[in-house]
Image: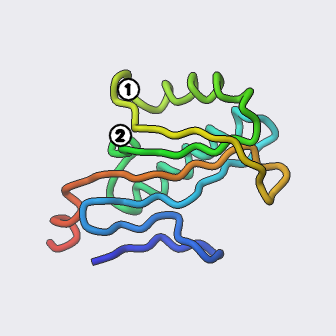
Amino acid sequence: MIQRISTPFSYSSAVAAGDYVFIGLHRGFGDTFEEQIRDVFVHLKNTLEQCDTSLDQIVQVSVHLKHIENLPAMEQIFCDYFAQDQYPARMTDTTEFFDKDCLLMIEGIAYNPGLTTSRHT
């Protein structure tokens, strides 16, 4: 069974398939980088809850930053959401976004072997 968390756009915010949740782009809102990244994590948590999983099950993320200067702040904020030595594999790059106010986007993969079982009971 495949579960899709739809958006009003032409992508899903997540697709749960088998033991994996493929997390589509999540962007945050706010005036500062810190406001936006913390908002991203609020949305990530909500999306993952809809897929019966949580942040600690994320195994890989790609973080797209508008400004590489935000990398140190991103590193510190990741420590607020993931336990030490329990960080997901990560790729970080820089890009230009269609929405000029967007400072970052995050996408990734979560692993939850209980998903297959819990959806069939």
- Residue at 22% across, 70% down: 119
Label 1: state its secondary structure: loop
The way the protein has been coloured in the rendering is rainbow
The residue under label 1 is 83
Count of marks placed on residues: 2
In the image, taking residue 121 as reference, residue 115 lies left or right, namely: right
In the image, taking residue 51 as reference, residue 25 lies left or right, namely: right
In the image, taking residue 48 as reference, residue 10 lies left or right, namely: right
The quarter of the rendered structure image containing the N terminus is bottom left
The quarter of the rendered structure image containing the C terminus is bottom left
- Residue at 37% across, 73% down: 3
Q: Position of residue 33 (x, y in %)?
A: 73, 35
Question: In the rendered view, would you say 113 is above or below 95?
Answer: below
For label 2, the crowd category at 10 Å Cα-Cα, with few meaning under 14, some 14 to 19 and many 20 or more, is some
Q: Position of residue 114 (x, y in %)?
A: 19, 57
Q: Of the residues shown, which amino acid type is indicated by label 2? A: Asp
Q: Position of residue 7 (x, y in %)?
A: 59, 72
Question: In the rendered view, would you say 45 is above or below 116?
Answer: above
- Residue at 65% across, 24% down: 73
Residue 60: give its label: none
Label 1 vs label 2: CA separation? 8 Å
Q: Are marks 1 and 2 in contact (CB under 8 Å)?
A: yes
Label 2: state its secondary structure: helix
Q: Position of residue 46 (x, y in %)?
A: 49, 54
Q: Of the residues shown, which amino acid type is indicated by label 1? A: Ala
The residue under label 2 is 56
